């Protein structure tokens, strides 16, 4: 027992000694890391304490310590709401569509760009595809609204082929298609950067050896290029699935309207109306905590599944 205690103390002292030496040796690196650490502490860890208002009837004048405790009332209110099923269903469907269609889009673009040999052509495509990412979301939504109007560009094309003009954003059955496809256009180029970086690490000798063995471009793609991307795809997919119950409210509230609530209203936009516009902060905190808990459980489950069957995981 005494021996184990001495070994534990020696290990701790050794760790602190190494840490002290490392800080002294790399003091400028630690100095540069301080703002990042401060950012996460101030804006990501300190606000966690405010989650207690999810179990209170928070009153801004009474504060956290003076507000009334109500337990699980806000959670039961949410699930007893006539809109609970609708917003959960819409959130899940939009995220599933994005995983099915938006997630593979940057992978396909990266694979295509990797096969193109003309550097000027490749750079032009990359620049054009990256540009939408740098445009403000408000401007992007303004473009979508203008293009979707009865006199917009999309309706001009529909009318050219004999179709009838209509305001596309006023049709609830088209909202998810417009939302997901516009997201692909905006983020496909930017998302391909990670996959192009992963492809740049592939040893060129593998392609030369396979070419000598008679493998064409298609065989090289199947047996060298795609396997090289699998670890990156797996990690990013795990992270994406971990947000399957979350969808930012900014783009939703800029595009939806009461006519499309049936397919467009998601958890975050519902919480925005109830929590922010009606100043029901406790309700918003309760639903946000519920959302984060579900996402965390899904992330753990998917990561464990991937580690067991695909041999790739976040940790």
Image (cartoon, helix red, strand yellow):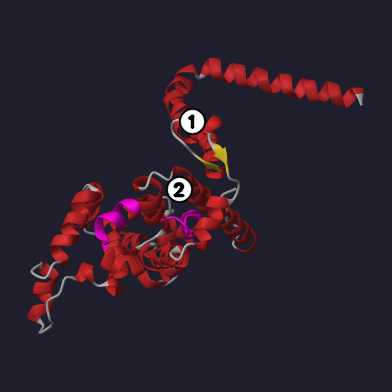
Q: Can residue 248 be seen in the rendering of this structure?
A: no
Residue sitting at x 59%, y 50%: 72
Give the extent of the magenta segment.
230-257
Q: Residue at x 46, y 26 (%)?
A: 38
Q: Are marks 1 and 2 in contact (CB under 8 Å)?
A: no
Q: Is residue 50 above or below residue 97?
A: above
In the image shown, does 170 or 275 lie closer to the viewer? 275
Residue shown at the point (27%, 61%) measured from the top left? 256
In this image, 292 relative to 249: left or right?
right
Across and down, in percent, residue 279 comes to: 39, 44
The residue drawn where x is 52% and y is 62% is 80
* Residue under label 2: 284
On the picture, is 55 further left or further right than 205?
A: right
* Marked residue nearer the N-terminal end (1 or 2): 1
In the picture, measured across the screen, residue 280 lies left or right of residue 168, that is right
Q: Is residue 136 magenta?
A: no
Spot the residue most to the right: 1
- Locate residue 151: give its quadrant: bottom left
Q: Please tell me the numbered disc located at residue 253.
A: none
Label 2, secondary structure: give it.
helix
Whole-percent x, y for residue 24 in the image: 54, 15
For mark 1, what is the residue?
62
Marks 1 and 2, how far apart in space? Answer: 18 Å
The location of residue 122, given as percent across then percent down, is 23, 56
**Residue 22 seen in this snapshot:** yes
């Amino acid at each position: 027992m005494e021996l184990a205690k001495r070994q534990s103390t020696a290990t701790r002292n050794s760790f602190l000694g190494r840490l002290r030496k490392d800080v002294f040796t790399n003091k400028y690196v630690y100095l540069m890391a301080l703002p990042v650490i401060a950012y996460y502490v101030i804006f990501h860890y300190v606000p966690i304490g405010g989650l207690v208002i999810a179990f209170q009837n928070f009153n801004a004048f009474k504060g956290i310590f003076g507000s009334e405790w109500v337990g699980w009332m806000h959670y039961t209110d949410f699930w007893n709401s006539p809109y609970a099923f609708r917003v959960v269903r819409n959130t899940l469907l939009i995220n599933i569509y994005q995983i099915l269609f938006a997630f593979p889009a940057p992978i396909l673009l990266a694979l295509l760009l990797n096969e193109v040999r003309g550097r000027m052509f490749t750079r032009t495509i990359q620049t054009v595809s990256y540009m939408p990412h740098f445009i403000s979301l408000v401007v992007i939504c303004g473009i979508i609204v203008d293009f979707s109007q009865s006199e917009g560009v999309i309706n001009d094309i529909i009318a050219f082929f004999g179709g009838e003009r209509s305001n596309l954003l006023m049709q609830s059955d088209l909202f998810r298609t417009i939302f997901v496809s516009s997201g692909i256009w905006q983020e496909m180029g930017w998302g391909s950067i990670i996959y192009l970086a992963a492809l740049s690490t592939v040893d060129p000798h593998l392609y030369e050896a396979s070419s000598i063995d008679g493998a064409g471009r298609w065989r090289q793609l199947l047996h060298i290029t795609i396997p090289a991307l699998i670890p990156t795809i797996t990690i990013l997919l795990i992270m994406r699935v971990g947000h399957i119950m979350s969808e930012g409210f900014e783009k939703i509230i800029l595009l939806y309207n009461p006519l499309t609530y049936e397919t467009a209203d998601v958890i975050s936009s519902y919480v925005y109306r109830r929590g922010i516009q009606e100043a029901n902060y406790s309700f918003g905190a309760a639903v946000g905590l519920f959302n984060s808990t579900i996402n965390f459980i899904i992330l753990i489950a998917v990561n464990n599944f991937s580690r067991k069957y695909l041999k790739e995981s976040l940790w």
